[in-house]
């Protein structure tokens, strides 16, 4: 009897093991930069998580409206991360405006007195501005974001320092030029010049050895870190063999945020205002720093994705394909340090119909730009002509941006219809209002808009095919298309329908899902079975986002 029981147990174990072997494991959705869903934050305007850091360096002068520090900080971003705000929105990359120490005073640009709340007026690249937080805050942000599968992308400025003020010394003449002003008539007149008056231009073309600025050395001595910083600089220049030229000092300081904190990427500011070889070198420095971080922190490595760089080549659009034309010279920035470039024309091309827009982008990305990508946006911090400045097309904005091939860049408040037209502001300050958390909490219309962006964002996050896949129209009426993506042993297929009738509807799925397959519409949450190449659903929405169950 015992032998029979034992044989039965052995047979059952073998059967169970065979079943386990036959059962196909669920493939983990890989992170793909070309399909990233990026959330872009003007750090000072998003959320004030630490009111004790709101007043620093006596920045107490009256400013023009929305031209001073409002209190937003890294701690505020951590709060929203803990609350699940980014996870619910399907965000897998957070990009913040520069967090390095800014000039202590401000200037009047003709639009009212302005402090460097935006982060683009650097005083010391090696320090985090206390108004946005501490290195401890940044470490916590990266750790918590990574735990949720969200990457952190910082903003790199190498082209210029901050303006000169009574409180902020100019960098030495072997570091910067203060004239002439750029005329933007040729390649040279974009580069060897200052963007605007009183914005010292770093001599990025120089390979001459220069000394550390005395004001910076004295600052570090007061802070008790001079010896440590100098030793670190010495080690960097010895390891890389680079001359002690201004650009390489700055690259070293920026790369420290990679080796120390494990950030995942850099958005590069004013990229076309230096010679392109600067960015090729910057990418090498970043790659080396990322490799060092992974070697030193093997348990913190998310995956095998390389460090990511996306450039702000102002005026570049996807139709330019690989080149930006200065008039007298064409430059391929993709061959000089960048995997992606910001696509400045998406906010215009979003006026196209869905198929025209999606087919164009897929064709270029799958052919001329294969292996590279663009980052699309409908609004940003310095584009005065967004797709929907009055926030009258918030649903359409979300649908076109989040479902378009390429990277989607959600500017903070796109998903909540944050106002881009603030009375009493001048210039780009109107684009940089405080995040409208009150509307999200209390306004029913805002909640509806946010829910739309959340559904789209989660679908994109869960399906690399949306941003990185091949687009193919299945049906013109009803409008239905597919996206397919394959990389190594991973494949992803989705079917999307737009402008559909509410209520019962039949959606053709082409050859994407076989007859008998069970699928889910993630927009409504309903499921169905493919029959004769179609899926029949009865929902209250004119959009379906189909995935295989």
Image (spheres, rainbow, N blue to C red):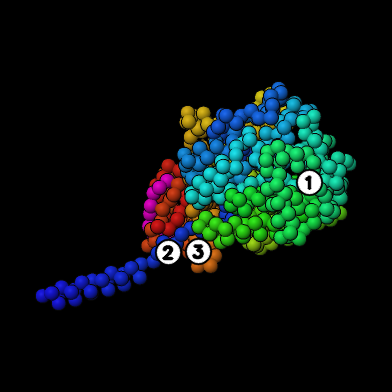
Nearer the observer, 73 or 544: 73
Residue 69, located in which quarter of the rendered image? top right
Q: Which mark is residue 212?
A: 1
User: Residue at position x 39%, y 49% from top?
Assistant: 526
Q: Pointer 3: what residue?
A: 491
Q: Residues within 10 Å of mark 1 (few under 14, many from 20)?
A: some
**Is residue 525 shown in magenta?**
yes
Q: Check contact, mark 2 vs mark 3: CB within 8 A.
A: no
Mark in the foreground, 2 or 3: 3
Q: Is the magenta stretch mostly helix, strand or loop?
A: loop
User: Residue at position x 69%, y 27% from top?
Assistant: 59
* Mark sitting earlier along the chain (3/1): 1
Q: Pointer 2: what residue?
A: 514
Magenta region: which residues?
524-533
Residue 336: x and y, percent? 74, 58
* Mark sitting earlier along the chain (2/1): 1
Identify the image quadrant of the C terminus: bottom left
Mark in the foreground, 3 or 1: 1
């Amino acid at each position: 009897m015992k032998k029979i029981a034992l044989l039965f147990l052995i047979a059952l174990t073998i059967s169970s093991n065979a079943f386990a072997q036959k059962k196909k494991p669920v493939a983990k959705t890989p992170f793909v930069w070309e399909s990233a869903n990026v959330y872009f934050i003007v750090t000072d305007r998003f959320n004030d998580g630490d009111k004790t850091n709101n007043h620093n360096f006596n920045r107490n002068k009256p400013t023009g409206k929305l031209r001073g520090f409002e209190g937003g900080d890294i701690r505020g971003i951590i709060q929203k991360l803990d609350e699940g705000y980014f996870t619910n929105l399907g965000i897998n990359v957070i990009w913040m405006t520069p967090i390095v120490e800014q000039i202590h005073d401000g200037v009047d640009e003709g639009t009212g007195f302005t402090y460097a709340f935006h982060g683009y007026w650097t005083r010391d690249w090696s320090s985090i501005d206390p108004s946005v937080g501490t290195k401890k805050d940044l470490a916590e942000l990266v750790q918590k974001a990574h735990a949720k599968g969200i990457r952190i992308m910082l903003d790199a400025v190498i082209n210029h320092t901050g303006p000169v003020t009574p409180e902020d010394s100019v960098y030495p003449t072997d570091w910067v030029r203060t004239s002439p002003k750029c005329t933007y008539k040729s390649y040279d007149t974009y580069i060897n010049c200052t963007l605007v008056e009183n914005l010292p231009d770093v001599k990025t073309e120089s390979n001459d050895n220069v000394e550390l600025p005395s004001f910076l050395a004295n600052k570090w001595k007061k802070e008790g870190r001079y010896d440590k910083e100098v030793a670190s600089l010495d080690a960097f220049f010895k390891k890389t063999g680079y001359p002690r030229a201004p650009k390489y000092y700055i690259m070293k300081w920026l790369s420290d945020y990679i080796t120390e904190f494990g950030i995942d990427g850099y958005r590069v500011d004013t990229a076309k205002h230096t010679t392109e070889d600067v960015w090729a070198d910057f990418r090498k420095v970043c790659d080396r720093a990322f490799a060092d971080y992974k070697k030193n922190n093997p348990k913190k490595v998310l995956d095998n994705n390389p460090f990511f760089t996306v450039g702000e080549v102002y005026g570049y659009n996807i139709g330019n394909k690989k080149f930006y034309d200065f008039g007298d010279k064409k430059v391929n920035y993709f061959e000089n340090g960048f995997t992606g470039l910001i696509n400045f024309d998406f906010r215009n091309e979003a006026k196209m119909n869905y198929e025209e827009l999606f087919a164009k982008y897929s064709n270029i990305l799958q052919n001329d730009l294969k292996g590279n990508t663009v980052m699309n946006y409908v609004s940003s911090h310095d584009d005065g002509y967004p797709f929907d400045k009055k926030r009258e097309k918030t649903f359409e904005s979300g649908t076109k941006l989040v479902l378009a091939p390429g990277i989607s860049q959600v500017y903070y408040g796109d998903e909540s219809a944050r106002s881009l037209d603030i009375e009493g502001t001048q210039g780009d300050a109107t684009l940089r209002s405080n995040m409208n958390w009150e509307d999200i909490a209390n306004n029913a219309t805002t909640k509806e808009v946010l829910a739309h962006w959340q559904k789209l964002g989660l679908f994109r996050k869960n399906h690399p095919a949306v941003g990185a896949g091949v687009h193919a129209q299945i049906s013109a009426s009803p409008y239905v298309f597919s996206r397919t993506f394959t990389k190594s042993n991973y494949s992803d297929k989705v079917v999307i329908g737009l402008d559909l009738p509410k209520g019962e509807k039949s959606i053709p799925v082409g050859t994407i899902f076989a007859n008998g397959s069970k699928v889910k519409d993630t927009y409504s949450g309903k499921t169905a079975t493919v029959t004769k190449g179609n899926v029949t659903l009865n929902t209250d929405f004119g959009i379906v986002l189909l995935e295989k169950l």
